């Protein structure tokens, strides 16, 4: 069996600017 994982963008501050996210901080994003 083969599993694939998409890019989770952990510890990447650009992800909050790239699209609408329900997180106000990078730490909140990484905890979710």
Image: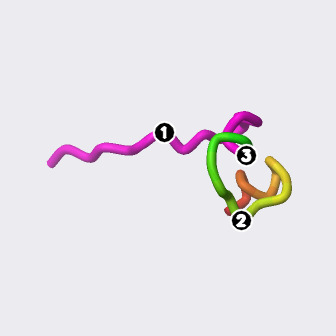
CB of mark 3 within 8 Å of CB of mark 1?
no
State left or right for residue 11 relative to residue 7.
Answer: right
In the image, the segment drawn in magenta is 1-16
As displayed, is residue 19 above or below residue 13? below
- Disc 2 and disc 1 in contact, CB within 8 angstroms: no
Q: Residue at x 68, y 58 (%)?
A: 21
Measuring from the top left, give residue 16's x and y in whole percent.
73, 46
Reply above or below: 30 against 4: below
Q: How far apart are the two marked residues, 2 and 3, measured between alpha carbons? A: 9 Å
Please tell me which of labels 3 and 1 falls first in the chain: 1
Identify the element where label 1 is drawn. Answer: loop
Q: Is residue 25 left or right of residue 1?
A: right
Q: Is residue 4 magenta?
A: yes
Residue underneath mark 1? 7
Q: Nearer the viewer, mark 2 or mark 1?
A: 2
Q: Nearer the viewer, residue 29 or 14?
A: 14
Question: In the rendered image, which residue does mark 3 sit on?
Answer: 16
On the image, numbered disc 2 is attached to which residue? 22
Q: Is residue 6 left or right of residue 29?
A: left
* Residue depth check, mark 3 versus mark 1: number of the one nearer the observer: 3
Q: Position of residue 12 (x, y in %)?
A: 70, 34
Which secondary structure type mostly characterizes the magenta part of the structure?
A: loop
Residue furthest out toward the left:
1
Query: Element type at marker 3?
Result: helix
């Amino acid at each position: 069996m083969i599993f694939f994982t998409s890019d989770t963008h952990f510890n990447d501050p650009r992800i909050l600017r790239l699209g609408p996210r329900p997180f106000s901080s990078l730490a909140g994003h990484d905890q979710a």
